[in-house]
Image (cartoon, grey):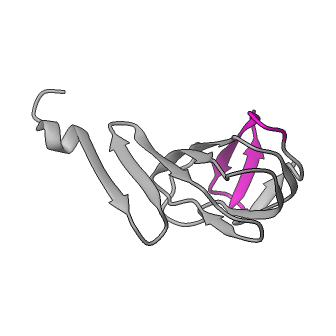
Amino acid sequence: MAGLSMEEIFRSSYDSASGSLKTSAVGGAYVITAPIAGATVIIAPTTTLQIVNPAGTLATLTVTLPSTGLFDGKIVTISFQQIISALTLNGGTIVNPVTVTTAGQTIGYMYRTTGTTWYRVQ
């Protein structure tokens, strides 16, 4: 990592508005959120790992994948720590969208700029 300062390699901040810890390092960022039922989790273009950690099972949740500021082949991984009974994914065309999750389930999508399409890869 010659030429980069430690600050450039690793940055942390807490977003009090969303209650998210955002930490970025070379290669991407992760975000931890604790949504409530009916909420929408919006994933930023710089996020590579989204951890969804609600207090318990959620009846409904919407996750919006980024649709601008992305490169072809970008992969976003989403880890669900609780059951989501009705999950809605949006943010372009979602191929093979997950609609229900189990506690501990992880899913991943790869972005293709042609058609603003997310393909499930995990």
> Is 104 contained in the magenta span?
yes
Q: Is residue 103 above or below residue 58?
A: above
Q: Point out residue 113 in the picture as x, y percentages from the top left corner.
A: 62, 56
Q: Point out residue 88 in the picture as x, y percentages from the top left corner.
A: 82, 62
Which residue is found at the position 84% from the left and 44% from the top?
101
Q: Nearer the viewer, residue 49 or 104?
A: 104
Q: Is residue 71 above or below residue 102?
A: below
Which residue is found at the position 70% from the left and 70% from the top?
39
> Is 76 contained in the magenta span?
no
Q: Nearer the viewer, residue 94 or 78?
A: 78
The magenta segment is 102-122
Q: Nearer the viewer, residue 6 or 32?
A: 32
Q: Is residue 73 above or below residue 85?
A: above
Which residue is found at the position 39% from the left and 37% from the top?
27
Which residue is found at the position 15% from the left and 36% from the top?
6
Q: Nearer the viewer, residue 14 or 55?
A: 55
Which image quarter: residue 51? top right
Name the outermost residue toward the top.
1
Name the outermost residue toward the front.
55
Q: Point out residue 62 in the picture as x, y percentages from the top left corner.
A: 75, 65
- Where the C terminus falls, by quadrant? top right
104 to the left or right of 21: right
Q: Point out residue 2 in the picture as x, y percentages from the top left corner.
A: 12, 27
11 to the left or right of 5: right
Which image quarter: residue 24? top left
- Where the N terminus falls, by quadrant? top left
Badge count: 0
